[in-house]
Amino acid sequence: MATPSKEQSKTEKSSKVRRTRRTGRRDPAAVQLLKKDHHEVEAMFDEFEQIEDEKEKLALFQKIALALKVHTQIEEEIFYPAERGEVEDDMLDEAQVEHDSAKKLIAEIEKMKPSDALYDAKVKVLGEYVKHHVKEEEQPGGIFSQAKRGDTDLEAMGASLKARKEELMAKLGSGKAH
């Protein structure tokens, strides 16, 4: 029996990541993209906690801030409005408030230096906000679950989200796309 190549293993792993835990079915493109963003930024917050060097902290926080700004904007411009009527209004309202709180904290942190008092604490709290937000969107019965049960074409929306994300990353991130 032949052992799978590294490329095959990588492909199998990535396809498993995109499958939902409960059904084994692949998430629609919009949900895949948003979940991928969630997991990438969570990993950046975990990495931030391990860094001592102030220049590295600043550089990583700038990546986190960019990722969050772009992610919140595509959710607010495309995903949330399309899901009104499909997802419970109070969940979407709470998600919007969570975005607003995160944006305010990002703005505060951006005015600081890593050597400032409370810099690390503010980044940690932002990470906790984000992890809470991710849980709210991804949990059974959460925003993504309700969206998948609705009538919105989440495959087509995935293409719209991806295009808008690329546009924003180029505009806000000086051409750096993910």
Image (tube, rainbow, N blue to C red):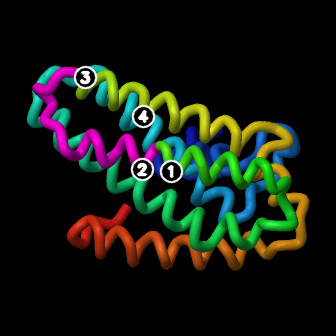
Contact, CB < 8 Å: mark 4 with mark 2? no
Question: Which mark is in front, 1 or 4?
Answer: 1
* Number of dots carrying numbers: 4
Nearest the eye: 86 or 43: 86
Does the magenta run of residues contain 104?
A: yes
Q: Secondary structure at mark 1?
A: helix
Q: Residue 160: within the magenta?
A: no
The residue under label 2 is which amino acid type? Lys
Mark 3 closeness class: few <14, some 14–19, many ≥20 residues within 10 Å: few
Under mark 3, the amino acid is Leu
Write down the residue under mark 1.
100
Q: Secondary structure at mark 2?
A: helix
Residue 120 placement (x, y as % from top left): 27, 24
Mark 4 or mark 2, which is nearer to you? 2
Residue that mark 3 sits on: 118
Residue 123: percent from left, percent from top: 33, 31
Determine whether the residue tagged by mark 4 lies in a helix, strand or loop.
Answer: helix
**C-alpha separation, residue under disc 3 versus residue under disc 1:** 20 Å
Q: Quadrant of the N terminus?
A: top right
Q: Which mark is residue 126?
A: 4
Q: Identify the residue shown where x is 41% and y is 57%.
A: 69
